[in-house]
Image (cartoon, rainbow, N blue to C red):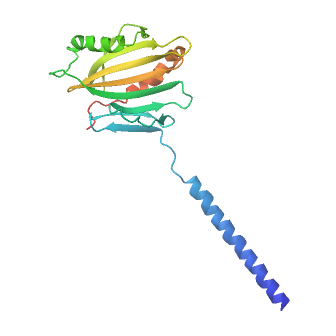
Amino acid sequence: MNRKLLGLVAVAAVLALIVGVSVGRNLISSEAALPQKPDVIRVKDAASGTSIAYPGAWTALPRPEGDGDLVLSVKRDDDVASFLVRTSKTDFAEEVTLAGLPVVRQLTDDLLAADDRVKLLRQPNTVELGGLPGWRYQYTFGSAASGGAHDHYFLFKKGLLIQIVFQAQPKERLKGLLPDFERIAATFRGNDA
């Protein structure tokens, strides 16, 4: 009788081992099959009918409560680069065109002048990004110890001001980050309804 019991225990142990190996393989293959983070993430803003894409390795930040104008805020994991997209209404009765950009420059200049720590790195230039006309500014802000630099787009669309603000911190990193910022900016679509 002891031999039969010993044989049954041995068979049960072998079966348990086989089942354990099978379950383990399924768990490992299930974890390996988890979807990978995409290389590029596109975010659409239904309210403005625009979209922009950013590298999948970057992290989207939660929208602060009460900041209805903020569409998107994203940072690189090393915290030296980030960008945000913000929309707000304008009082312009007519559509802003490339030819009309000199008229709206006073608005964009005034928005930057509100912060007396802003120092232009070069004169702003007109741009057309994603089919929308606008102004592009590059400037530093803040103190030498805690400041940074921005590559800032002001774009106009049917009564909206759309701002895309790329940030480098510290400010000395801006030059090296501009190619990345320009690649992201080039993904912007002004009419992505």
Query: Image quadrant of residue 50?
Result: top left
Residue in front for this viewpoint, 179 or 73: 73
Q: Is residue 65 left or right of residue 29?
A: left
Tell me where residue 172 appears, x and y as whole percent.
Answer: 54, 14
Tell me where residue 95 appears, x and y as whole percent.
Answer: 17, 22
Q: Residue at x 55, y 32 (%)?
A: 77
Is 76 situated above or below 12? above
| View extreme (bottom): residue | 1
Tell me the quarter of the image containing the N terminus: bottom right
Tell me where residue 191 appears, x and y as whole percent.
Answer: 26, 32
Q: Residue at x 52, y 46 (%)?
A: 36
Is 110 situated above or below 34? above
Query: Image quadrant of residue 130?
Result: top left
| View extreme (front): residue | 66
How many marks the image carries: the answer is: 0
Q: Residue at x 58, y 53 (%)?
A: 32
| View extreme (left): residue | 93
Q: Residue at x 35, y 20 (%)?
A: 153
Tell me the quarter of the image containing the C terminus: top left
Q: Is residue 25 left or right of residue 138?
A: right
Query: Image quadrant of residue 156?
Result: top left
Tell me where residue 125 appears, x and y as whole percent.
Answer: 33, 12
Q: Is residue 84 left or right of residue 91?
A: right
Q: Is residue 82 left or right of residue 66?
A: right
Residue in front for this viewpoint, 7 or 77: 77
